[in-house]
Amino acid sequence: MIARHWQHLLLLCAAAFPNAGALAQPAPGLSEIIVSGSGEVRVAPTRARLTIHVRRTAPTAAAAGAEAARASKAVTSALAAAGLAGDGITETSVSVAPHTDDNDAHRRRTGFDATATLHVETTNLDRVGPLIDAALAAGVTDVDDAEFVIDDPQAARQQALALAVAATRRDGQTLARAAGGGLGELLVLSTIGLGDAMPAALVEAPDYRPPPTDVVHSTVVPGLISVTAHVTARYAFLAPAR
């Protein structure tokens, strides 16, 4: 968009079209051109994050917690056997809550549910599917969508910023020519937001069952990560000479 008073700018453009080749230097108070630009760089992820849950139900809270803890230990061992590094489990937690019968009008408590949650990270993206398989076989009942990230997004962000700035100059030149003038010096440049759009991972994992003879393997497809940058620029508008 072109800043300042539109009527004044239109008068400048109308007077200038017959001699659009001659441009004057910007004078104090003359119009500016304000443009926004975006840049996007798509890069391959370097790390995968998984959140898995083990749910167990028992008559008492203590028994449910103990069963969830035993199952969590079995899952940890299975993940290690499947190739997860020693520091691959970054966080664990256990929660316990009453289990109620939803078919009972009074929602009668019938026991307790315990859920052990494990947060898993790996840089070996080819092993994400086998890790899910190992966890399911060991007793995991829920697997959240995998999240793929890049460890150091700065290089990609710098490239996206450069593309965004170049976009503002291209658009500014187009606007200036359309108004019969030219694009002057850059006056102000600022970022108006940076963000990483993480792709959804495709996780096709079967529900937990005792391992059958014909195992259905999980498929995890890591998508490219889009790193975007957005900037706003103000340029001087070189009005055509009269």
Image: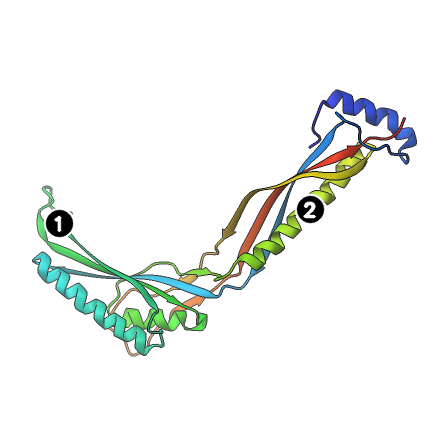
**In the drawing, does residue 232 fall left or right of residue 20?**
left
Please say if the residues under marks 1 and 2 sit with CB atoms less than 8 Å apart: no
SS category of the residue bearing label 1: loop
Give me the C-alpha separation between circle 1 and circle 2.
60 Å
**In the drawing, does residue 17 fall left or right of residue 58?**
right
The answer to which image quadrant residue 55 occupies is bottom left
Measured as percent of width and height from the top left, residue 220 is found at 43, 66
Residue denoted by label 1: 101
Measured as percent of width and height from the top left, residue 229 is found at 58, 48
Instruction: Work out whether residue 241 or residue 187 is closer to the camera in this orientation and state it.
Output: 187
Residue denoted by label 2: 167
Q: Amino acid at mark 2?
A: Ala
The residue at 66%/51% (across/down) is: 163
**In the drawing, does residue 70 fall left or right of residue 221?**
left
**Of callouts 1 and 2, which one flags the residue occurring earlier in the amino acid sequence?**
1
Numbered marks: total: 2
The residue at 16%/56% (across/down) is: 113
Measured as percent of width and height from the top left, residue 95 is found at 19, 55
The residue at 17%/58% (across/down) is: 114
- The disc placed on residue 88 is none
SS category of the residue bearing label 2: helix
